[in-house]
Structure formats: C-alpha cells, structure tokens
Image (spheres, rainbow, N blue to C red):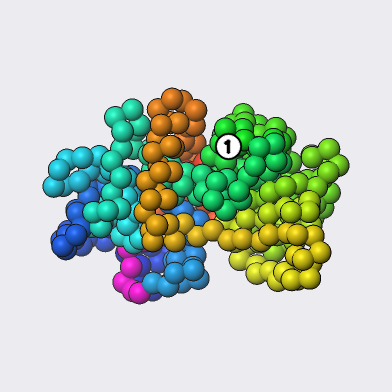
C-alpha cells in the first residue's frame, strides 16, 4: 500500500511517500480501506515529537480515518491513533463508528475529532448554561467552525468568534457567530469585552496559548471558565491559584483521547452530531482535500493558518 512514513522527526520534509505491505488486523481489530484521512494541527506536533502523546519511529501519522471495513463492507469513521495517512489501517473494532446513509465521508470525518471536541467543549468541559456568552478561538478552523454552528443550539447567548482575517471572520458570522473580532493577542481582552457590550464573558474556548491565553483569562466574569483545547503558539502559561480563588475562575483542559477510556461519551455525542448533520443543522467546512503525496503541503498550509475548516487527505489518488 501507499503510505506517508516518518523515519526521523523534523519539518514537513520528513513526510515521505513510500510503499509498504498492507497491515494485518490482529484479534479485536478490523482492516479499513481508507477513503479520507483527517489532517489535524496535532499532526504537526507529532511530526516533531512535541505532542501530548509520544511516538516511536518509523511512524505513519494520522489519527482518524473514514473508509470501508474490509470484513463487512460497512462505511465507518474511526480513531486509529496512528497509521491514518495510508491506503489501509487497522483499527480496534470498538473504535469504528458506522456512518449513516445521509452523511458523506467528508462530513463524517469532520464530525469525528473536530465535532467531538466542539460538542464536549460545550457540554462536558465548559458546561455552557442557557444564555451564557461564549468566545470561540480559531473560529474558522475545524473545531471553531463547528462551535459557531453549535453555539445557539447548545444554549449559548452571545457567541463571539476570534479569527485572524476578514474572510475568516465573515465565515464565522455566516456559520452563526453573533460577532467576530480580530484574534491578534495584543489588546484581545479589550476587544472581547467590547464585543460583549463592555461586560466580561462566561466561557472561552482557547486554542492558542501564550499571550492570547492570558488575554482571554482576564476577559472572564466571576465563575467564568477558560477551556484549553489547543496550544497552537506552543507557548506555555502559568496561572495563579490566588487569582482563580479571587475570581472563582475555572481553567480546564480537554484532550480528545481521554474519551477513548469513556466510549459512551463518544457514541452519544456522535449520534447527536450525525443526527444534526442529517437534519442540516451542522455542515462540514472542508477547507481542502489533498492527494496523499501532498501531505507535507497540507501540513504547511495548516501551520501557516492559510486554511479554513477541516483538511483531508485522499489516499486513493
């Protein structure tokens, strides 16, 4: 099979297209013929061995796929952990989620990692209550674009989108945000407060880290929640416990792979997301579909923030 393999950690140049033997499913696994592989910002961290999880070489990157089970012919999406940038991948049977007839592979894959993240930011991590104001970082990205669509559906009051360009802010508004503002770190707190009528906000979904994290934290109202679901800047932050106590703030993180230990949290959320997709309430924003051989170009485009929505690899071409 054709696959992207990493034999040393480094820049995009380490993503090499190669020919490998098809994987063989072990007990409890199924072989999936991949129609689409998801491209995630975390893949760029993994390529440099700077992600939350650590990897061993040689490595086929790619944590999620859509495709067809070779044993049953059923269309599925699956969290594979590694191996997704390939024509075939073996996946634990329990991680294969059937795709409904009314949902195409591109949409299904966009709703897997990005959709699960968006859903659980509202429901499980942010505990967004009716009428609360919500700030969405990277609002034109894979997670952010779905958060904008889910905001009012999940009961949020005012949805404030953060994005870096006029075009991305326009997309966020089109997807359901009430207001969209510049995501540049400098002066971000003031812009957030202004966008919320001069008042502090209740919940922030923060994906950048560094100065943006600090600005968002200080835009929170008492009892506000800062939900960390990314660190695109790769800049780490420190939080004062006395500050949290004084303002009754909560700072919480969300790493999707902890859901694998609680499969019921995956199945319930995916059922809801697929139903919403079939009703036309949410749509996948697919920012590009790249041939397998162009995986490096796709990661560069993502790292340079030249894309919107979900990026996909097509291993069939």
Percent coordinates x, y for residue 68 in the rendering: 22, 43
Percent coordinates x, y for residue 158 in the rendering: 71, 36
Question: In the picture, which quadrant includes the N terminus?
Answer: bottom left
Q: Does the segment drawn in magenta span residue 57?
A: yes
Horizontal relation, residue 189 to residue 77: left or right:
right
Q: Sort mark 1 into few (<14), some (14-19) or many (20+) by Cα contacts within 10 Å.
A: some
Given residues 261 and 47, the one toward you in this image is 261
Give the answer, above or below, for where 62 lies relative to 59. above
Horizontal relation, residue 72 to residue 37: left or right:
left
Given residues 87 and 284, the one toward you in this image is 284
Given residues 293 and 252, the one toward you in this image is 252
Q: State how many labels appear.
A: 1
**Residue 258 lies in quadrant:** bottom left
Residue 269 in view: yes
Residue 143 in view: no
Kindly identify the residue that appears in the image at 61 percent across and 60 percent down.
252
Element under label 1?
Answer: loop
Extreme residue toward the left, this view = 71
Instruction: Name the chief secondary structure element in magenta.
Output: loop
Q: Does the segment drawn in magenta span residue 288?
A: no
Q: Which residues are magenta?
A: 56-61
Give the answer, above or below, for where 139 lies relative to 223. above
Give the answer, above or below, for where 202 lies relative to 14. above
Kindly identify the residue that appears in the image at 40 percent across and 54 percent down.
295
Percent coordinates x, y for residue 246 in the rendering: 81, 64
Kindly identify the residue that appears in the image at 57 percent across and 41 percent down.
147
Q: Which residue is mark 1?
A: 154
Percent coordinates x, y for residue 42 in the rendering: 48, 59
């Amino acid at each position: 099979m054709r696959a992207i393999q990493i034999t040393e950690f480094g820049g995009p140049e380490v993503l090499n297209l190669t020919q490998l033997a098809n994987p063989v499913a072990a007990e409890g696994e199924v072989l999936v013929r991949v129609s689409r592989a998801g491209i995630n910002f975390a893949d760029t961290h993994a390529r440099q061995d700077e992600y939350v999880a650590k990897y061993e070489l040689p490595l086929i990157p790619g944590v999620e796929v859509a495709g067809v089970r070779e044993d049953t012919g059923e269309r599925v999406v699956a969290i594979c952990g590694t191996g997704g940038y390939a024509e075939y991948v073996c996946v634990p049977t329990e991680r294969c989620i059937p795709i409904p007839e009314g949902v195409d592979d591109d949409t299904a894959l966009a709703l897997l990692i990005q959709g699960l993240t968006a859903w659980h930011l509202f429901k499980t991590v942010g505990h967004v209550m009716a009428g609360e104001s919500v700030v969405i970082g990277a609002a034109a990205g894979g997670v952010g674009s779905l958060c904008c669509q889910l905001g009012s559906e999940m009961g949020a009051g005012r949805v404030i989108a953060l994005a870096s360009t006029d075009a991305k802010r326009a997309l966020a508004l089109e997807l359901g945000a009430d207001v969209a503002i510049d995501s540049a770190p400098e002066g971000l707190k003031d812009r957030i407060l202004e966008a919320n009528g001069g008042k502090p906000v209740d919940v922030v979904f923060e994906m950048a880290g560094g100065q943006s994290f600090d600005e968002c934290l200080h835009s929170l109202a008492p009892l506000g929640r800062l939900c960390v679901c990314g660190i695109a800047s790769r800049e780490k932050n420190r939080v004062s416990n006395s500050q949290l106590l004084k303002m009754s703030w909560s700072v919480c993180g969300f790493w999707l792979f902890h859901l694998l230990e609680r499969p019921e949290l995956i199945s319930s959320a995916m059922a809801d997301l697929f139903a919403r997709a079939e009703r036309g309430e949410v749509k996948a924003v697919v920012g590009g579909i790249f041939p397998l051989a162009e995986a490096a170009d796709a990661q560069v485009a993502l790292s340079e923030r030249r894309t919107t929505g979900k990026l996909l690899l097509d291993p069939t071409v």
